[in-house]
Image: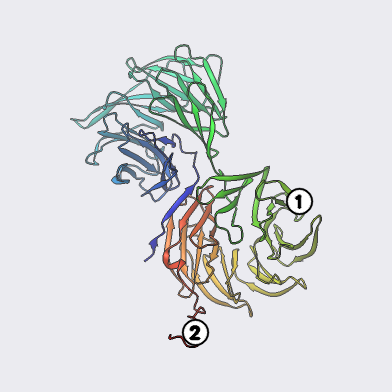
Amino acid sequence: METELELSAVIGFKGTVADGLILHPNNEHLLFPLGTTIVVRHIIERTQQFLRGHDNNISVITVSDSGKYIASGQQTHMGFQADVIIWDFDTMSILHRLKLLHKVLIQSLTFSFNEMYLASVGGQDDANLVIWDIESGNAVCGNPTGTNAVNRICFYNNSDDRLISIHDYQVLIWSADYSNKKISNDLVNLGQVKRKFTCVVIDHSDSFAYMGTKTGDIVEISLDKAMYKRIGPVKRLFSLGINCITQVPNGDILVGAGDGTIAKIDHSNMRVKSEAEVLGAVTSFSLTADGTHCFVGTDKATIYWSDTDTIEPELRNTCHYAQINDLAFPYGFSKVFATCSINDIRVWNSKTRQELLRIEVPGLECHSIDFLKNGKSIISGWNDGKIRAFLPQSGKLLYVINDAHNHGVTVVAGTNDCSRIVSGGEQGEVRVWSIGSQTQVMEASLKEHRARVSDIKINANDDQAVSSSHDGSCIVWDLENFTRIICLFESTMFKQVVYHPDESQLLTAGSDRKITYWDCYDGQAIRMLDGSDSGEINAIDITKEGEHCVSGGEDKLVKIWNYDEGICYNQGTGHSGTITRVKISPDQSFMVSVGSEGAIFIWETPKEVIEAKADSEMPEAPEDGEVA
């Protein structure tokens, strides 16, 4: 039975969840969903805790007014039930798991002001509104919401039996009768106004509600009369619609738009008072307790801190928002690591989880990175066919090898003496480049692969390299004569290859879900492990001793295997997307995995893996005169 890996830290923020960034009422913790996990980050101490109970991506999260309870809902596959979980914040544990009443997706959640009830509504495949008793965890009442799917629900601020639901083109006000276990609704009269409503906020007196629309304006309604009141801002529409809305204590309204605009609107005349722009579509606002400042989240994985009066956002946190393609540590140095994705390479501090350096090449995608062993440069392969080298501290461009590969460079690897680079391309070429102080010259072009080269590893003596490809072959090359030494074939798309530390064996992973051990001398497969039950394996790495290896892939699990026994003893759950790379730190104390969702997960290496010694490491013989 596999034991669960301990998650040490997460670098990432999935800004696509609407209103998913929440400042806890204690003003000390920031909460946000990341895949199947809720991250609870202490703002000052920068420590992290994790709430893990969902088996699929979290679609919505909310916190009660006092901060005692957290509620989260998930999406799941068509035809399956979608769970809602109520968490106790003080104990960081599950209080209730609410199941069986929603299918496929939880669209929205809201707590009543007295924290007695939780309302949940499903997506368009479910279309049910249910109110739950928080103390018992039982459903109190519910009703279908009709064919028009609900986009958001919200309890009144001073009533636990009235709530509002916003739809495409209509708004409903619901009244709950808890004694008779019934809930009914009234349709708000919107007159001639036709809008797709996306978000809602109710004023502090429960007199009016303000709703953002996909058109880019705000509709105000009277809750007492259930009637349309006015629309604004005057002569101004926000591009790409309004995604989130909130109200500050003086009554002014903050809106976040799809084009990255944050605006403050005067509630008396519906005119824009101040505005600013951030990177990405704004998806979340979370006010401090006094309403003077707020956190802002965007779909480009950035978190900003802003004054609600002047609207001057300052960047607080950032991460990759697209798939991370590669991950690399400097040789023998565990305090930093680098990742690459669309548009940029980022260098991270592994202890503080802070971004140290960002190297941007706009409009391009970096497929592969590596630190040269002397630490003097970061080499990278890009989809425009160029190899770029950067200084690791300043990010300054050192040199560019133009037209290194047609249709893109897919993998780069530096030799141990730092004098050569071996690269692979989209069309199967493996090329060796001599790196001088002023020049970069191609020494050889080896064309035997028929498809994308997925990985290249170089042995300790720099006289051999192994390349894996999507054509189902792994080739060991002689780097002195530039000839093929041996070729391994399998009916799979090889994704990654590693040398065993003693270089007598190779380890491969690929689309056939197998981890295969190969003999380096005759090219025969020695052993095959079922690395996954459900998806291909994209990433593999091995410890310094060669006693354990770690894998990751489409099943979103990080697994640690005993090399000799071929048994998986540990696995880590947390990724919401396919794992693209996994690496063990040079000091073996932690592992880093990256995925298609753009998140970086840092795992603690189990003690038995750190302390494992290779079979060849026998106790030293006692010297003469000593007693063994």
For label 1, the residue is: 400
* Residue at mark 2: 621
**Residue 497 seen in render:** yes
Residue 162 position, x and y percent, is 29, 25
Q: Position of residue 65 (x, y in %)?
A: 32, 31
Counting from the top left corner in percent of width and height, residue 133 is at: 24, 37
- Viewer-nearest residue: 220 or 370: 370
Quadrant of the image for the N terminus?
A: bottom left
In this orientation, which residue lies closer to the viewer: 293 or 112? Answer: 293
Task: Evaluate whether residue 452 shows in this view.
Answer: no
Observer-side mark, 1 or 2, equals 2
Q: Mark 2: which amino acid?
A: Ala
Q: Secondary structure at mark 2?
A: loop
Please, which residue is most extreme toward the left here?
A: 179
Q: CA distance from mark 1 to mark 2?
A: 53 Å
Marks 1/2 in contact by CB < 8 Å: the verdict is no
- Measured along the vertical axis of the image, is residue 202 above or below residue 582? above
